[in-house]
Amino acid sequence: MAVASLKRVSNKGKALDALIKKIYMIKWREQHPENVKRHRKNFLEKNPDYLKEYKRRNWISTRIYDRRYKMKNHQAFQAYWLNRHQKDKLKALQLISGLEKPLCADCKCSDLRILEIDHINGGGTKEIKSMLRKTNIHREVAMGRRKTDDLRVLCKVCNVKHDVKRRFMLDYKVELIGGVN
């Protein structure tokens, strides 16, 4: 009887030591955040597949955590993706037009809200549908994964005008009323 109770006390002692060590590490991490970042970076450089393996093993808990985190920070995520899309669009339009401030190739309009990427020979819808992953053509161009030889920058009005001309072989003149620029 006495031996069994000693074992329990020693197990409690190990558990207590582990708890004390855990509390100490938490306090140390709070006091030394730069060291924690450095150690984490070094660890991930030495073990590049660690995060993938962790997510593979704990996919349910990471999915739940990610979903809760995104719901909690919905507005921040929404602002981030909107900002990222705008930056990608601007960079793509700059690469295609070759100008720092992109302009429509026809009417020289410079309003980024209405500038679009036009496929010179058509086929833009087919290209977007054939993309294997759900992605954005602005992102593909901005990241350099898509060539820009057959692309140009047009405003929405000029793009529709060229599309109608290309599809129906109609040629007409479009004049803007109110001077959008």
Image (cartoon, rainbow, N blue to C red):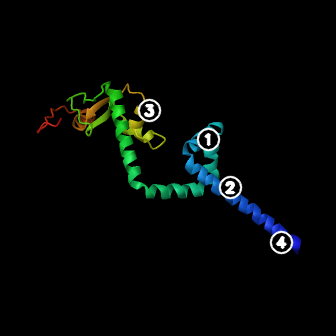
Q: Calculate the distance from the C-alpha at mark 3 to the C-alpha at mark 4.
A: 66 Å
- Numbered disc in front, either 3 or 1: 1
SS under mark 1: helix
Q: Is residue 76 visible?
A: yes
Q: Quadrant of residue 83?
A: top left
Q: Horizontally, is 73 left or right of 27 in the view?
A: left
Q: Position of residue 29 (x, y in %)?
A: 59, 49
> Image point 34% across, 40% down: which residue?
86
- From the image, which quarter does the C terminus lie in? top left
Q: Calculate the distance from the C-alpha at mark 1 to the C-alpha at mark 4.
A: 41 Å
Label 1 CA crowd tier, 10 Å (few <14, some 14–19, many 20+): few
Q: Where 6 sits versus 50, above or below? A: below
SS under mark 3: loop
Q: Position of residue 96 (x, y in %)?
A: 34, 28
> Image point 21% across, 29% down: which residue?
108
Farthest-out residue, bottom: 1
Q: Calculate the distance from the C-alpha at mark 3 to the C-alpha at mark 1.
A: 31 Å
